Each structure stands twice: as structure tokens, then as C-alpha cells.
Image: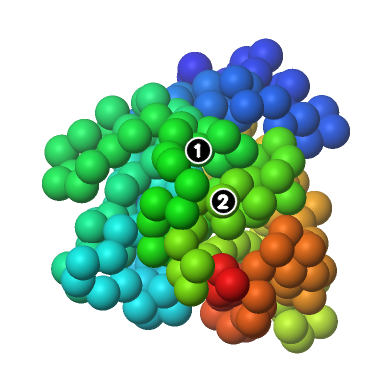
Amino acid sequence: MGDRGEDAHSAGLRAGLDKRPADVAAMFDRVARRYDLTNTVLSGGRDAAWRRATREALDPRPGQTILDVAAGTAVSTVELAAGGASAIACDFSQGMLRAGAARPVPKVAGDAMALPLADESVDGVVISFGLRNVADPDAALREFRRVTRPGGTLVVCEFSSPTWAPFRTVYTEYLMQALPRIARAVSSNPEAYVYLAESIRAWPDQAALAGRIQAAGWSDVAWRNLTGGVVALHRARRS
């Protein structure tokens, strides 16, 4: 797709934030080629720090198996494996997995709502900037619990609600106006970032997401704000 038009998939996603898995996967297929560069530019270079904070929240250990859901090009998976754990990249976008093919971690195609793993087969599940793109986030949270061993950990890294009201207003304006313009300069599918901006604005705040994680059966749910609440790290335990 060129920078001057919007294809049917992107238009459909923008209309009411439709999250049909096939459409979302197709959208990510089209942004895969320059996805990592675009993320770095749009986050002002904060994406690397957010990945480190996610790994620290999970605290993976050698001998553990970690599932990285919505892993994209597996940049986040490599970070999770840095401490010696076995980290598996899982994504439903074949294009994203292909774009990260050179990264030395196992990869598997899979939907967050129907993971291709056995019950209680991993020590931890991480999903970074992906839960809001799932058609049924609550079903995904229950699925994450299914595949996690008792005592295991869930970490959700996701855009959230800035805690300082004046900055929250500026941030919302950035999402809806500046972000799509910047994406046109660096992304292989800039119109997809209009949908992504809208999905961030529509996402529940920190407390509301914590409630949904708990309702899905997780225990000891807590969160930590990053970058003033632009991003929140939610952590929970599988009892």
C-alpha cells in the first residue's frame, strides 16, 4: 500500500475498532517490514526501556519456559531470553514472524485466544502492546492462565492512561494527530497507525485492566506505571 490511500482492511478496522483476527493479522502483515523502526520513532526511543522493564517484572530464570504472545518480530522475545530462560515467540501474523526470522528464538504461529500449547506448560506469559488488539481480551487472559503452571507469572505491558491530567490531554492529541503523521514518514502502512491510535485511546485504564485480569482468574494483580502512565506493566500470579 502507498502513503496516499487506505485499504479495505485498515478502513474496516477503523470502523468501530473491529478486531476480527484475520483483519488484525493482515494489518500487521503489512506493517511488519518497518515495524521495529516505526515503534522506536513513535515511542521517542522508549521502546527498549519498556522491554527491559517488562523482563524485570517477569524476572525469568534459567530453566524456565516463557511464552511471549503477540511477539511480532521477536525483539521482545530476545529480551526475555537474555537471562537464560527459554522464550518462545508467538504471533498470529505470519508476516511479523517472517520479519523476525533471523532472531534466534523459537517461533510459533498462534492466536492469543487459542494458544497452541498444552495446559500448564509454561512458567510465564508475557504480552506487550498486543492485548488491546485481541478480539476478546478476557478470553485471552483466561487462555494465558490455562497454559501457565501454578505459581507462574503473567506480565501485560500495554499503553495506558497518563496519571497527570494536563499531560493526558497532550498525549491524546499526539495519538490522534501527530502519531499518524509521523507514521506516514516511517511506516510501510501508515493508515494502520490511525487504528492503533484509536485502540490506545479506547483501552481501559490501569485499575480497570487490573480488574479484568483478576476476573480471568489471576491472583496478586498489581501494576507499575512507566513514562508517567503512558505505559503500564500489570503483573499477576497463577494460583
The residue pinned by badge 1 equals 115
Alpha carbon distance from label 2 to label 1:
9 Å
Q: How many labels does the image show?
A: 2
Q: Quadrant of the C terminus?
A: bottom right
Q: Which of 209 and 75 lies nearest the eye of the viewer? A: 209
Q: Position of residue 178 (x, y in %)?
A: 63, 53
Q: Which of 226 and 60 lies nearest the eye of the viewer? A: 60
Q: Where is residue 69 in the image (x, y as percent from the top left)?
A: 46, 48
Q: Where is residue 62 in the image (x, y as percent from the top left)?
A: 19, 71
- Amino acid identity at mark 1: Leu
Query: Of the residues tagged 2 and 1, which is closer to the observer?
Result: 2
Q: Residue furthest top?
A: 8
The residue pinned by badge 2 equals 146
Q: What residue is rendered at 49% in x and 19% in y? A: 2
98 lies left or right of 44: left
Check whether the beta carbons of the residues at disc 2 and disc 1 lie within 8 A of each other: yes
Q: What residue is rendered at 39% in x and 30% in y? A: 109
Q: What residue is rendered at 21% in x and 34% in y? A: 101
Q: Residues within 10 Å of mark 2 (few under 14, many from 20)?
A: some
